[in-house]
């Protein structure tokens, strides 16, 4: 069963300069017990996607078409605020980028971890025991006394681990991790990712892992979804997409990864140009203005082409390019 | 959801006493307060005033309202510690009983203003934009009335009374409290931990109660304790002008008024009325400022 299945999702924002098509025909699956990475540069719609799934779009945002099927049963685009609230937390929970801001500064960690279990109907002592257990699980030293301490008494990495503990406390079916390691330094990033991997295996939840760090995605995820300007340009297993990228954007993105540089250079490669203004989306391929392989066929709207089982790319050359990498 | 709560690991631990952290925080705050000389001084003055007001009947045998024309304008003596006023009433007894009025007005009106101000501020800060704008307009309009004018207008309608004083204080205080809460609420409602709480399914009511209230209420309570002298001054001022407590009930303001007309001949009447106002004001101000420093969560652990 797929935990989360997004099909043809379109999100529009009304702005003062006119309507903005933030997500266009976004489709992807988060299968059960899999970690799916969502990758793309800033402004490609990653955060909008999370908010659309959580039902927390800003007031000027609107879902126009598409469905977000959760556990095969609930279409999150049609659920009312009450039903969405009941899913958020126990079934779908979230870890955010900034560990400094994710905890309430005036409440002790214990109070917050006990508070968040308000739905469980257990006694305060049971909730506290559960909190200690979760803190031990995310390897917070001296978990018992940690409950009495305040967020500012912890380091950034510890705060992020506490946030992860709180997100996983109710053993959700889906964990949405919004760049949880971006604010951490490289060593902490590795330990946090190993921790996430461990916990995911123990709890058996699915994870939607948002990042712009290709190395992290390759390390952690089973599947990857590459987003560009609010569209899914390529998706498939990490192995397929990283070893045999079929969309020019994915190829350029991989070339730009500093970890893949083999030659010494003063200037790291970049993709020239910028994401197009989403108020005036190009008719054809959205990446065409920056694409080196652009040709007449790119003027028309692009269909998602299936390359292999579970691997597809939104580029008319996706099938023609087969074998180029290999 | 409780049936889903199977433990993830085998880690079993003894449940810690859940109420301990809050208690020890309060205790730590009190200990820090007692280390501050200014705070101890303020606390002493406040306790002195409270003690005098509570045990007024035990501290003096005189009835504060009993008129005794033969003993008018007596100098302070063993029998009359602060002398007597123009009607021969014992001033010490009047000062102690006046403290009851002052503290009663201060505590009741501050508590009611806080409750109303917090609710209105949360609504303005968390509610829709148009409501916020409307409420700010009302707050500002209310604040722009001079206190004395407001008191005069109200007393003209309902007559002078203690309730009138309390209502005036509430009308004067609420807009300020509500604005502070509103500003704090707006600042906090966009912070990441509120977003996180929303993403974990917390309702608006829950976010207001669990996340926003604790962040905004501490500073406001401290601020309100620093406002108590102002409230006492309003009560004294209104009673001085004859808009507050009605004679013969003793109030510091009315004692001050009695002494005002006799200040050349018998200055101790004005002193007896003015000194407790000064002592109480100083005490609450020192205490309030120290409390603010002691309970500021950003200074915790120092």
Image (cartoon, helix red, strand yellow):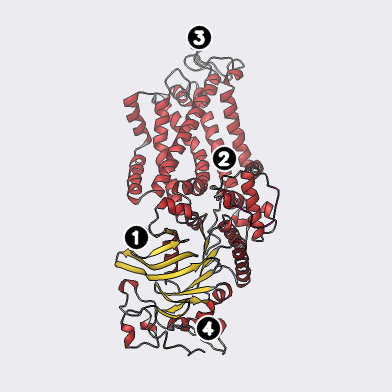
Taking depth in this image into account, of B193 and B138 the one nearest to the observer is B193
Q: Which residue is mark 4?
A: A243
| Chain letter of the residue beneath label 3 in the structure image | B
Q: Nearer the viewer, residue A194 or A14?
A: A194
* Quadrant in the picture for residue B40: top right
Residue occupied by mark 1: A60
Spatial CA distance of label 2 from label 4 is 70 Å
Picture coordinates of residue A197, whole percent (x, y): 60, 67
> What secondary structure is found at the residue carrying circle 2?
helix
Vertical side of A20 occupied by B278: above or below: above
- In front: label 3 or label 4: 4
How packed mark 1 is, by other alpha carbons closer than 10 Å (few <14, some 14-19, many 20 or more), is: few
Circle 4 packing at 10 Å, graded few (<14), some (14-19), many (20+), is few
Quick check: marks 3 and 1 in contact, CB under 8 Å?
no
Query: Label 3 to label 1, Cα distance in Å?
Result: 80 Å
- Comparing marks 3 and 1, which lies closer to the viewer? 1
Q: Position of residue B259 (x, y in %)?
A: 47, 23
Name the chain letter of the residue that bears numbered label 1. Answer: A
Answer whether residue A148 is visible to the viewer in this image. Answer: no
**Residue nearer the viewer, B187 or A14:** A14
Q: Is residue B127 left or right of residue A87?
A: left
Q: Which quadrant holds residue A191?
A: bottom right
Magenta residues, as a range?
B5-15
The secondary structure that dominates the magenta segment is loop
The kind of secondary structure element at disc 4 is helix
The residue carrying mark 3 is: B70
- Residue with the mark numbered 2: B286
Specify the subunit that label 2 lies on. B
Q: Kindly report the distance in space between the C-alpha atoms of the residues bearing marks 2 and 1.
A: 49 Å
Distance from Cα at disc 1 to Cα at disc 4: 40 Å
Q: Is residue A283 above or below residue B111?
A: below
The verdict on residue B9 being magenta is yes
């Amino acid at each position: 069963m797929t935990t989360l299945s997004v099909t043809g999702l379109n999100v529009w924002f009304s702005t003062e300069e006119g309507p903005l098509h933030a997500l266009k025909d976004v489709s992807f699956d988060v299968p059960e017990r899999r970690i799916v990475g969502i990758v793309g540069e800033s402004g490609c719609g990653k955060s909008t996607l999370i908010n659309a799934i959580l039902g927390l779009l800003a007031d000027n945002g609107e879902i126009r078409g598409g469905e977000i099927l959760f556990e095969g049963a609930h279409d999150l685009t049609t659920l009312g605020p009450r039903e969405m609230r009941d899913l958020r937390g126990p079934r779908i929970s979230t870890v955010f980028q900034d560990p400094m801001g994710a905890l309430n500064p005036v409440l002790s960690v214990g109070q917050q971890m006990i508070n968040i279990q308000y739905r469980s109907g257990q006694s305060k002592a049971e909730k506290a025991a559960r909190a200690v257990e979760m803190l031990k699980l995310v390897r917070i030293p001296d978990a018992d006394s940690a409950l009495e301490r305040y967020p500012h008494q912890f380091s950034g990495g510890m705060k992020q681990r506490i946030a992860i503990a709180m997100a996983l406390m109710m053993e959700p079916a889906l964990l949405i991790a919004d760049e949880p390691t971006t604010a951490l330094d490289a060593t902490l990033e590795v330990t946090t990712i190993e921790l996430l991997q461990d916990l995911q295996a123990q709890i058996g939840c699915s994870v939607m892992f948002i990042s712009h760090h290709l190395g992290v995605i390759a390390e952690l995820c089973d599947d990857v979804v590459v987003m560009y300007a609010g569209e899914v340009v390529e998706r498939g297993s990490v192995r397929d997409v990283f070893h045999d990228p079929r969309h020019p954007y994915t190829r350029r993105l991989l070339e730009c990864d500093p970890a893949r540089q083999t030659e010494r250079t003063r200037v790291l490669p970049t993709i020239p140009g910028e994401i197009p203004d989403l108020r005036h989306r190009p008719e054809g391929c959205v990446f065409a203005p920056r694409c080196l392989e652009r040709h007449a066929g790119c003027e028309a709207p692009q269909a998602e082409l299936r390359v292999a089982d579970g691997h597809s790319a939104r580029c008319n050359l996706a099938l023609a390019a087969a074998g180029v990498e290999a | 959801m409780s049936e889903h709560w199977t433990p993830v690991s085998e880690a079993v631990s003894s449940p810690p006493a859940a109420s301990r952290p809050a208690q020890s925080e309060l205790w730590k705050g009190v200990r820090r307060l007692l280390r501050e000389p200014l705070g101890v001084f303020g606390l002493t003055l406040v306790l002195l005033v409270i003690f005098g007001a509570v045990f007024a009947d035990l501290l003096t045998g005189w009835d504060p309202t009993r008129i005794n024309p033969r003993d008018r304008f007596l100098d302070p003596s063993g029998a009359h510690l602060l002398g007597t006023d123009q009607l021969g009433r014992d001033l010490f007894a009047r000062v102690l009983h006046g403290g009851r009025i002052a503290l009663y007005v201060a505590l009741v009106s501050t508590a009611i203003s806080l409750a109303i101000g917090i609710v209105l501020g949360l609504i303005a800060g968390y509610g829709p934009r148009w409501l916020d704008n409307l409420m700010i307009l009302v707050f500002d309009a209310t604040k722009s009335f001079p206190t004395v004018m407001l008191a005069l207008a109200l007393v003209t309608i309902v007559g002078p009374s203690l309730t009138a004083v309390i209502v005036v204080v509430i009308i004067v205080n609420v807009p300020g409290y509500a604005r502070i809460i509103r500003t704090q609420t707006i600042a906090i409602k966009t912070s990441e931990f509120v977003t996180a709480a929303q993403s974990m399914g917390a309702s608006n009511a829950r976010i207001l109660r669990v996340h926003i209230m604790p962040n905004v209420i501490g500073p406001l309570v401290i601020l309100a304790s620093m406002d108590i002298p102002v409230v006492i001054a309003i009560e004294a001022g209104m009673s001085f002008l004859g808009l507050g407590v009605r004679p013969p009930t003793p109030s510091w303001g009315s004692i001050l008024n009695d002494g005002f007309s006799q200040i050349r001949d018998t200055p101790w009447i004005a002193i007896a009325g003015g000194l407790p106002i000064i002592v109480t004001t100083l005490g609450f101000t020192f205490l309030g400022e120290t409390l603010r420093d002691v309970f500021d969560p950003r200074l915790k652990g120092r």
